[in-house]
Image (cartoon, rainbow, N blue to C red):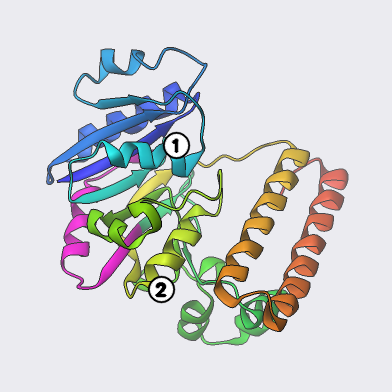
Amino acid sequence: MVSIIIINYNTFTLTSNCIRSVNRYSVGVEYEIILVDNASTECDAGEFLKEFPGIKLVKSKENGGFSYGNNLGIENSAGDHILLLNSDTELKEDCISKSVLQMQQQPGLGVLGCRMTYPNGNIQYTARRFRSISWELLDLFRFIPWLMPYKKRAKRMLGKYFRHDETMECDWVNGAFFLFPKKILELFPGKKLDSRFFMYGEDQLWCEQVKNSGYKIFFYADTTIIHINSGSTDLSKQLSLRKTMMKHELEIMKLRQGKGMYYFIFKMIYVFKEGSRNVIKKIYYKLTGKLIR
């Protein structure tokens, strides 16, 4: 059985649409839905039970963040597989049973993420490589990767350099659809998901820990979900989010490499590159009134 953990925080309509799509399309697998309400103020979380009486509703007394909420859900789960599913996702096919079958057919698979698109059909870059000095330099001078043959470029870089049209082993996947066997939690501190980050970067951190334990991370291209992921339309909020993500990236690199020479060289390149892009975003916004991702 798959325990599907969905976190709700003031997203009643989105969350309801997500649950509705799971119930409609998940016909080839036994599952339970565990909805964790992270102390929402939008409405009484009990409203969910009126439309979805079969779900498990867990009410948190505080908004402890993404990891915190998922750990609450996992504590109340009965499945041998866990699927962390964002509330702003929608299924359009039986992707859960397909993903579970793929995981069962791949020995040593620790985490599986699937193909995601925006509502307009554009691909989201959900299969990633861990950052490194060489990756940052290639991304900074991105004409170099684009001179490589596609197969070499896609496998070396992933992310925006990969068409997301084939199943591939990667370093980490987006946490909006994050499937793993429950047993791997035995490898985590406290036998639960690491919750050092309130939000953003948890998926990369967890994949780092899973890979360090000898398991593989897979991007599965043969099924697709919609991930709305609209993001903020406010420039200051977007830049604040990027600042948080940069901070978490540096923390993860420190865990991976220690605080030695490699870390400081990486930090110098990474902060320069991302800081420059933030300046470009500001200039572009002032000239056009539009935000770029």
Q: Amino acid at mark 2?
A: Asn
Residue at which label 1 appears: 88
Foreground residue, 103 or 60? Answer: 60
* Magenta stretch, residue numbers: 89-113
Is residue 54 inside the magenta stretch?
A: no
Residue 80, how many percent across, how many down?
17, 51
Looking at the rendered structure, the secondary structure element under dot 1 is: loop
Residue 109, how many percent across, how many down?
27, 69
Tell me the number on the disc at residue 290.
Answer: none
Q: Residue at x 68, y 57 (%)?
A: 247
Q: Which class describes the residues within 10 Å of circle 1: few (<14), some (14-19), or many (20+)? A: many
Is residue 94 inside the magenta stretch?
A: yes
Reply above or below: 289 against 115. Answer: above
Q: Residue at x 32, y 61 (%)?
A: 112
Reply above or below: 265 against 251. Answer: below
Looking at the rendered structure, the secondary structure element under dot 2 is: helix
Residue at which label 2 appears: 212
The mark nearer the N terminus, 1 or 2, is: 1
Residue 42, how many percent across, how many down?
51, 16
Q: What is the number of callouts on the image?
A: 2
Residue 292 visible in this rendered orientation of the protein = yes
Residue 126 visible in this rendered orientation of the protein = no
Can you name the residue that lies furthest to the front here? 190
Reply above or below: 35 against 258. Answer: above
